[in-house]
Image (cartoon, rainbow, N blue to C red):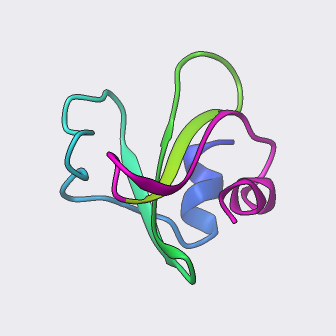
Amino acid sequence: MSEELLQASGFEPCPTPPPGWGNKSGTIYTRLLPQGRAYVRCLPDGPGMVEAFIGNWKRPAAYCRGAVQNVEQLLWLLA
């Protein structure tokens, strides 16, 4: 997963990081999904590595961290 793929699929840079993510490195992207607002950041841990959640960071409606090949897979993991 790359930042370019996120932007091409409607994710936009998040001007204000969600509470709890302000100290994380890298650009955070956001997109409103039917389940709620999703937040994603690409991780430097390896190719395709992301951390993502929907809703509130302290009590997310969905959460995933790992290698993701494309946006469709990311959305499926967050569904």
Q: Is residue 9 left or right of residue 55?
A: right
Q: Is residue 19 left or right of residue 25?
A: left
Q: Residue at x 27, y 39 (%)?
A: 21
Q: Is residue 75 left or right of residue 40?
A: right
Q: Which residues are magenta?
A: 56-79
Q: Quadrant of the C terminus?
A: bottom right
Q: Does 17 appear above or below 44?
A: below
Q: Does 45 appear above or below 69?
A: above
Closer-to-camera residue (74/14): 74
Q: Residue at x 79, y 62 (%)?
A: 72
Q: Residue at x 50, y 66 (%)?
A: 11
Closer-to-camera residue (67/58): 58
Q: Residue at x 32, y 46 (%)?
A: 58
> Whole-percent x and y of residue 53?
50, 52
Q: Indicate yes or no whether the magenta region holds residue 59.
A: yes
Q: How many numbered circles are shown?
A: 0
> Whole-percent x and y of residue 17?
23, 50
The quadrant where residue 46 appears: top right
Closer-to-camera residue (7/66): 66
The quadrant where residue 67 appears: top right
> Whole-percent x and y of residue 24?
29, 29
Q: Does 73 appear above or below 58?
A: below
Residue at the limit of the structure toward the top, as seen here: 45
Q: Quadrant of the N terminus?
A: top right
Residue at the limit of the structure toward the front, as seen here: 59
Q: Indicate yes or no whether the magenta region holds residue 41.
A: no
The quadrant where residue 47 appears: top right
